[in-house]
Image (cartoon, grey):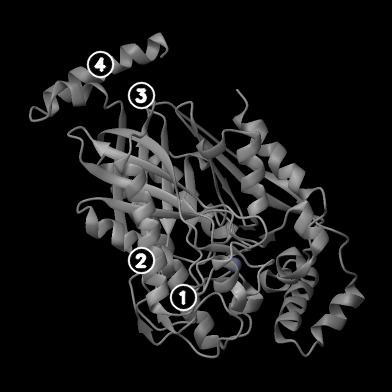
Amino acid sequence: MRPRYLFLLSLLVLVTSFNLPCCSVAAAETATWQAGTARVNVTPEKYIWMAGYGGRNRPADGKLTDLWAKALVLVDADGDRAVLVTLDLIGLSREFSQSVCSRLKERHGLERQQIAFCCSHTHTGPALVRNLSPLHYLIVDKEQQDLIQEYTTTLEDRVVEVVGQALSKTAPVRLSWGSGTATFAVNRRNNPSNQVPQLRAEGKLKGPQDHDVPVLAVRDAAGELRAVVFGYACHATVLSFYQWSGDYPGFAQIEFEKSHPGCLAMFWAGCGADQNPLPRRTVELAMEYGTRLAKAADEVLAKEMQVVEADLKTHFREIDLPLAELPSREQIEQDAKSENKYTAARAKMLLARIDGGQPLSQTYPYPVETWQLGDKVQFVTLGGEVVVDFALRLKSELRGTGTWVAGFSNDVMAYIASRRVLKEGGYEGGGAMVYYGLPTVWAPESEDMIIDEVHRQLSP
Ligand SMILES: [Zn+2]
């Protein structure tokens, strides 16, 4: 501990001892972080179009569980702040994050690198504007487009609100971390879903996977659990029906909060772009996986966890991530006549942009964000649907289970395939680009560029 921290720590002990006469001095002595939490219900009030599957032909028609935006504010011993916002949503656009961040800067003086938005990627939540446009927005009628716009605007206000609430009630806490395991994620590129039960029973499931369940525990000065943050690398695609639901991550948070009253449970999706929860498609399975994940987090809490020192470092940068060779205008015009409605929708969107004076760009401003919590935990939040290779590589090159890699954060603009997956092709390697509206696939060097930026930010 640096002398400056010792000084601040002794000040804090004084302050907390006076403020909290009920708790022991021993508990107060270690309460060098401050934290605040808040939640807001973001379930759409109207039955609007749902996100996630191309096959949908009508808006939502019911609700299984509510959807939430949750905020955790952390303040370290020096007063440096970070705000984590988790959302039961499929993804977000760059414009959405930018707009919320500029409002948070204006109101609360927060900088971009102090804010992270992590989505659960539930496929039974609402569609948002400027996210997966050819899949959800461009193919629906004007009435639905207006409803999607209205919801997105309301959501933005609620996210700004929830962060404000969390900021307004910070109190001394202790942070600790650990890592558990849950095994329901299966590499969906390497295992035919109908064969998964048998392959699993025989121990023959193939392909890379990441079964870690990283856990951050936030306890108040009296030792009560106030918040828990956990992640898992798997698509939230158990359910595909027409009722709002948080899918397995929603149930994991509900289950955890049920067994820990007064605790806010927050979920972030890891690099699970190529991972599915299998078998799937029943409410019972969504609940079962949710319960397994909540139990995995609980098991981590039951064991001795490692203390996270009250020192926070935050970084954020958009790198110019290169795309492969761009299509010609002739190719796009050809696509605009395609019988595939998504291909045609993307082509028309690109043509409208070009004609509006915005030529196609060879690169995309890809967000890489890292937070260092103490000297053990590295929380990396990456944009897009990131395949598992990124998490495995970063963990092996950095701190193992102390390196947490979230995808689906800040801007979900496309699948983010590794060099290997780009080479193999298939849906995650290229086919999915059409639904996001990007003109082509990523260039092969994109993996190294993302990894290099993470290393750059985390190097001392
Ligand atoms: Zn996905």
Report the quarter where the N terminus lies.
Answer: top left
Query: How many residues crowd around disc 1 within 10 Å: few (fewer than 14), some, or many (20 or more)?
Result: many
345 or 120: nearer the viewer: 120
Q: From mark 1 to mark 2, how far is it between C-alphas? A: 13 Å
Residue 208 location in percent, x, y? 65, 55
Identify which amino acid the numbered label 1 is placed on: Thr
Q: Earlier in the sequence, mark 4 or mark 1?
A: 4
From the image, tell me which residue sits under label 1: 124
Q: Residue at x 29, y 17 (%)?
A: 9
Q: Nearer the viewer, mark 1 or mark 2?
A: 2
Q: From mark 3 to mark 4, how far is it between C-alphas? A: 10 Å
Report if the CB atoms under discs 3 and 4 are less than 8 Å apart.
no
From the image, tell me which residue sits under label 4: 11
Q: Earlier in the sequence, mark 2 or mark 4?
A: 4
Identify which amino acid the numbered label 2 is placed on: Phe
Q: From mark 4 to mark 1, how far is it between C-alphas? A: 48 Å
SS class, disc 1: loop
Q: Which mark is residue 26?
A: none
Q: From mark 3 to mark 2, how far is it between C-alphas? A: 34 Å
Q: Earlier in the sequence, mark 3 or mark 4?
A: 4
Report if the CB atoms under discs 1 and 2 are less than 8 Å apart.
no
Residue 44 location in percent, x, y? 38, 75
| Ligand 1 positioned in quadrant | bottom right
Residue 367 location in percent, x, y? 63, 48
Report the quarter where the C terminus lies.
Answer: top right
Q: Quadrant of residue 130?
A: bottom right
Report if the CB atoms under discs 3 and 1 are less than 8 Å apart.
no
Please indicate whether residue 169 sits to the left or right of residue 437 in the image: left
Q: Residue at x 43, y 61 (%)?
A: 156
248 or 95: nearer the viewer: 248
From the image, tell me which residue sits under label 2: 251
Identify which amino acid the numbered label 3 is placed on: Ala
